[in-house]
Amino acid sequence: MEYLPSPATWPARERVVDGTVLLAAVGIAWLLPLALPGGPAGASPLAGLAGLVVVGALMTAARRHGAAPVAAGAAVAGVTAWALLAPGWFATADVLTNPLMALAPVFVTYAGHLYRKDRRRAWTMAALLVLVVTHPWSTSVTITGDGLLYVCTPMLFGFYREARTMLVRTLTDRARDAERERDLCEEQARTQERTRLAMELHDVVTHRVSLMVLHAGALRVTATGDAVRDAAENVRAIGCEALVELRELIGVLRGPQDPAPATAKDARPGGGRFLAATGGHSPAPPRIGRSDLAVVAAAIVWTVLLSVTVASSREVGSGEPTFPWVEIALQLPLAAALLLRRHHPHLAAAPTLAGAAVMIGLTVHGAADLLPAGDSTRLLVPAVAPLVAYALAAHSRRPVLGAAMVLALTALAARPWEPHTAVVSVAAAFIGLPALLGLYAGAWRRLVAALTERAERAKRERRLLADRARAAERARLAHEMHGIVVGRVHDMLDWANRLGGTEPAAQAAGEAGEATLSTEPERASAELILAGRQTLDELHELVEALQAPAGEPGPGGGPPDLAGLAADSASVGVPVDLVEEGDPALPSPAIARTAHRIVGEALTNVRKHAHGSHVRVEVRYDPEQVRVRVSNGRPPAPPRDAARSRPGDPELAAGGSGTGLLGVRQRVELVDGTLVAGPTRDGGFVIDAILPAYVPTSSHTVGAPSP
């Protein structure tokens, strides 16, 4: 919140500036009249208006060159000299309208300077200056009106202009931050997609390595030679270590479970509660509450008190306490209309405008019995007019219409068809000051809302930047772990080559797909070499997925092959009954690959945790859905000599990453499917998934291997 002015220290330079301004105000309001004659001024307010134009141009040029204090001092000295050199013409002891009007731009500039430095000090100085200029002990309406109009009003305008400038800068920065946050969200989505892709490929690599471990374990049990047995044991041990390291790799890739990214609704300022980044309108007002009722009650009390005070004054009435029943009765509905000041400010202001027109019309036509007649300085507008002006400026969501209604109300109060300087000054202060205060309040409210939303956006941006840093670190660690795992697999291949495997034998093993564990050294070596090379290829795909540039789709893979999965499991001693009903070409590629993933993960879990149990895979292809059910029974009880007769390996079961079923569930939910997984009563395990037959997405999003 760098644009939000807050209480700060009062430096020596600022003390000098504030003291100089107060002394200048005292000199103009109190000391200058001592050197001037009394009575009305010889010059009209046009002289003050000309001075305002000249001083305004001077202050504008000085602000651009950073010489505002010098220009302000020159303006004060020039206006004072003008009043002293032409005594009784430009200003008199009783009328300081022209000097104060000419110095109004100085107060605007000073107010902006104060507001940027310290908001509380700005309001304090504004109150002191108004007290100095308005002469609270004086009964002159002209002096009070001039002080409010030419000192208080410029100060409020300076506050509003500075708050508006802060709001524009904040909204501009917020729009830039929104673009940056959008880029970060896109990068986070890409990182999450790569992580899901890496988890998918990890499960595939785990499947291959587990096959190598089981082949090596079977060869270790059945081999007769010590050299072959030792080589098989080395392959098995290295494979188990590779699985453990793969589990660590996937743990690094997953990282901490961060909360879900912000949705499109949350991405809007304040979840849709604040103004748009390109607009300057106020937020939507809340419902009518107690504060609105309190304002109406205060307006009624104000109407009664002001009407009684005006009617009882000597200028209007006889000086005796008078209660104008008719006037109060006419104005009470106008006060009640303020109940809509926040929701429909124009509708709330319309009765007041109509009431002002009626009051002026009755006075013009001489209805003195209804409205007390008096001198022309009385404002013939409803007592709630300042409250209405404030509501229009602060809550109007149609600035042009709101400004037009405020100007109309000011014109009715000033009665330009009967020009009178005192009436114009009092009318401008009575209507203009609340309007400026409302403008400032509205701008301040929008600024606070924008800064609050910006702070929330900064928190989200910090989280996204932290996510990006963590993703980069995970990718770096993944590359290191990849090198370690590749080294392990190469060691496995070296030991497999020592068993006597050759390239033709490896190709023959890949084409045969026998349903039994190979016990001959050459045959087992060929199968290990084939599985190891497939593992290396898939590991390289994993790293390529992590390094893929933005927007590049991941590997899609070929059509799902459930029969191949069943053959792989059967080759390591896990028989599978595969039952497919219906046309496998019915589902979309994304659904087919999801079914392939479910079956593959289920069979891998059986090999790890229930080796030797019977597995049944049932897949039903319907026009509307695809049902995949994989079940296995209780694993057979190990014999006494389990270490030498059972191909299952406890270290293989301990080497999993724990993300298999989680990834499957995420993949199923991604295509709007359902998944049920759990143990059965007979000690087995079942995975039952129901998938839609078609998901209208591109093949490189849901269709790509990403859980």
Image (cartoon, rainbow, N blue to C red):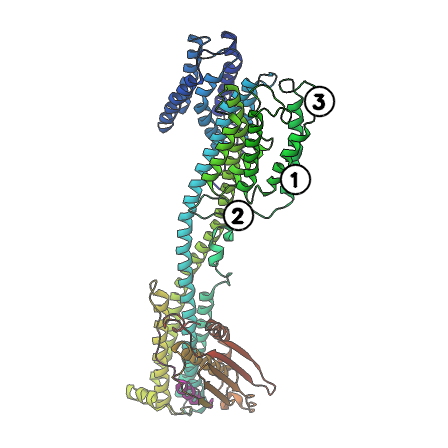
Check contact, mark 1 vs mark 2: CB within 8 A: no
Q: Is residue 238 visible?
A: no
Which residue is the extreme one toward the left? Answer: 504
Q: CA distance from mark 3 to mark 2?
A: 45 Å
Q: Residues within 10 Å of mark 1 (few under 14, many from 20)?
A: few
Question: Which one is in front, 356 or 525?
Answer: 356
Q: Earlier in the sequence, mark 3 or mark 1?
A: 1
Question: Mark 3 highlights which residue?
Answer: 321
Q: Residue 613 placed where, x, y %?
A: 52, 89
Mark 3 belongs to which amino acid? Answer: Pro
689 on left or right of 291: left
Q: Earlier in the sequence, mark 1 or mark 2?
A: 2
Q: Residue 159 placed where, x, y %?
A: 49, 32
Q: Which mark is residue 294?
A: 1
Question: Mark 2 highlights which residue?
Answer: 284
The quadrant in which residue 384 appears is top right
